[in-house]
């Protein structure tokens, strides 16, 4: 099938339904035996799993569903089956689509379509070793489902943290988060662009004139202003650890603490990055002043050692629960290089590059009552603009700020904003953010900072 497809001249393939059910055929049993034999001694197999003779042990079932997760009371062998299934699937996927596919076409674009659903621990690659996650793939597509706003219940229907997670797990490669609703065209594109991904148009009614106008304006925006996206690095002061080791060990509480706390931080405009526990290095930690840990997360000895060293060098390591995040948010915001005072419906993402600071803002507020009486297409988005947002951004010492400009997909050209410089902080007010706006601060260094 792949040879035929490549022969038609296509650029790449998107692989869907990356699933595995509880197959226990002779081939799966043989491969699983090889897996166990390579990881455990005969004595360990007997003590851990009750397997006396691996070569003849019958596996009547292999409980390794992808997507899926072992039951709470599952035997220890079930976790090994999940790990085996994840690596076995990736090995065969690579053999077909990456190794063979790129032998046919050396620059074949390869990606998989997976599912996330609010940082779910059941995502298809949950048990895949970190170093194999997305290895060799060009970009990532994850489906989120339909997540509408419910503002009275304090729900923005956002996928902000999911986007940050995808950028982290994918090593900064392009990603697409699928949100299946035909109404909030602008919000769904904006949150992806702000966090380093690309917005999608699936399930968005482009045959309706307003939908086409909005979608085309937002998808063209990065091409009109590439300087707001290219050559930049994330500029958050703190990172929040995603506890994959704890999740694979069955600790869902750590994942719950993560989800609750990051939602509070983002709604208080505290800039942060997601840092996967498999991606912790001394060099990576040096980018932050604070590392947040979900309370109770299990960490590997090597990660614990790096965190101890980070703390000795002056970094702050803070275990966090939902309750702790409420007070911590104000402390972090007071020390952040990017301080934004906005309603809880606004989220911010800072980036930095040579001679510039860039701040992305996404506003999720909307008139839900008015929307309910309209056709459920993009005319029903009904955004309520956030106004007079005050911002303070720390600049390099010795920098001379030349301009502060406000961009928006709906605007024909950028707007110059008045600003003041107070020591190393540049202060300005964003007059209005309807759905998505980007602020660019241009500067030059008068002398090398000490």
Image: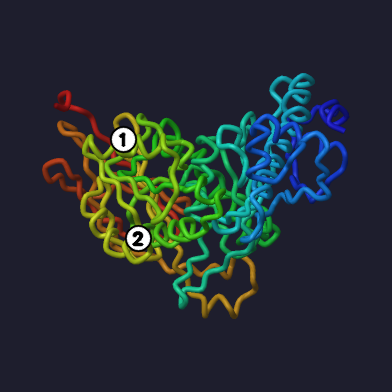
Residue 258 horizontal/vertical position (percent): 44, 56
- Residue at the disc numbered 1: 356
Q: Are marks 2 and 1 in contact (CB under 8 Å)?
A: no
The local secondary structure at tag 1 comes to strand
**Residue at horizontal 68 percent and vertical 58 percent from the top:** 203
- Residue 260 in the image: state x and y as whole percent: 43, 62
Residue 424, x across and y down, in percent: 15, 41
Please determine whether, in this image, residue 181 is positioned above or below residue 222.
below
Say which of 185 and 121 sits in front: 121
Mark 1 neighbour class, 10 Å CA radius: few under 14, some 14 to 19, many 20 or more: many
259 left or right of 285 in image: right
Q: CA distance from mark 2 to mark 1?
A: 22 Å
Q: Which residue is mark 2?
A: 432
Asked if residue 363 lies left or right of residue 291, the reply is: right
State the image quarter where residue 350 is shown: top left
Q: Could you tell me residue 66's position as x and y percent? A: 71, 49
* Nearer the observer, 79 or 413: 79
């Amino acid at each position: 099938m792949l040879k035929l497809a490549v022969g038609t001249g296509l650029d790449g393939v998107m692989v869907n339904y990356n699933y595995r059910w509880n197959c226990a055929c002779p081939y799966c049993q043989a491969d699983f035996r090889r897996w166990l034999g390579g990881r455990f001694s005969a004595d360990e197999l007997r003590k851990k799993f009750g397997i006396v003779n691996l070569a003849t042990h019958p596996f009547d079932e292999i409980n390794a569903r992808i997507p899926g997760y072992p039951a709470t009371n599952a035997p220890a062998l079930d976790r090994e089956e999940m790990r085996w299934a994840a690596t076995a699937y990736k090995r065969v996927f690579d053999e077909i689509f990456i190794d063979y596919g790129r032998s046919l076409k050396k620059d074949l674009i390869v990606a998989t379509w997976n599912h996330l659903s609010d940082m779910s621990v059941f995502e298809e690659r949950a048990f895949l070793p970190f170093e194999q996650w997305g290895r060799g793939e060009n970009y990532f597509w994850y489906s989120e489902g339909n997540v509408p706003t419910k503002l009275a219940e304090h729900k923005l229907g956002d996928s902000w943290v999911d986007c940050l997670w995808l950028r982290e797990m994918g090593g900064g490669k392009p990603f697409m988060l699928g949100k299946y609703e035909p109404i909030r065209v602008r919000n769904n594109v904006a949150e992806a662009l702000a966090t380093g991904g690309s917005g999608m148009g699936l399930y968005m009614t482009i045959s309706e004139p307003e939908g086409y106008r909005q979608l085309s304006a937002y998808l063209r925006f990065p091409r009109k202003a590439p300087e707001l996206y290219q050559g930049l690095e994330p500029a958050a002061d703190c990172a929040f650890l995603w506890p994959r080791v704890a999740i694979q060990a069955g600790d869902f509480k750590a994942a719950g603490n993560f989800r609750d706390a990051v939602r509070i931080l983002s709604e208080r405009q505290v800039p942060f990055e997601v840092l996967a526990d498999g991606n912790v290095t001394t060099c990576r930690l040096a980018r932050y002043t604070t590392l947040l840990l979900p309370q109770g997360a299990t960490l590997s000895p090597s990660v614990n050692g790096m965190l101890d060293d980070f703390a000795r060098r002056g970094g702050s390591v803070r275990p966090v629960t939902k309750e702790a995040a409420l007070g911590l948010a104000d402390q972090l915001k007071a020390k952040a290089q990017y301080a934004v005072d906005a309603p809880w419906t606004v989220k911010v993402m800072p980036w930095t590059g040579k001679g510039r600071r860039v701040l992305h803002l996404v506003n999720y507020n909307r008139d839900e009552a008015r929307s309910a009486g309209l056709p459920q297409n993009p005319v029903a988005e009904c955004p309520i603009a956030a106004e007079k947002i005050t911002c303070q951004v720390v600049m390099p010492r010795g920098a001379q700020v030349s301009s502060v400009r406000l961009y928006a997909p709906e605007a024909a050209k950028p707007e110059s904003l008045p600003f003041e410089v107070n020591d190393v902080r540049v202060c300005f007010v964003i007059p209005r953010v309807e759905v998505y706006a980007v602020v660019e601060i241009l500067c030059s260094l008068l002398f090398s900072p000490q």
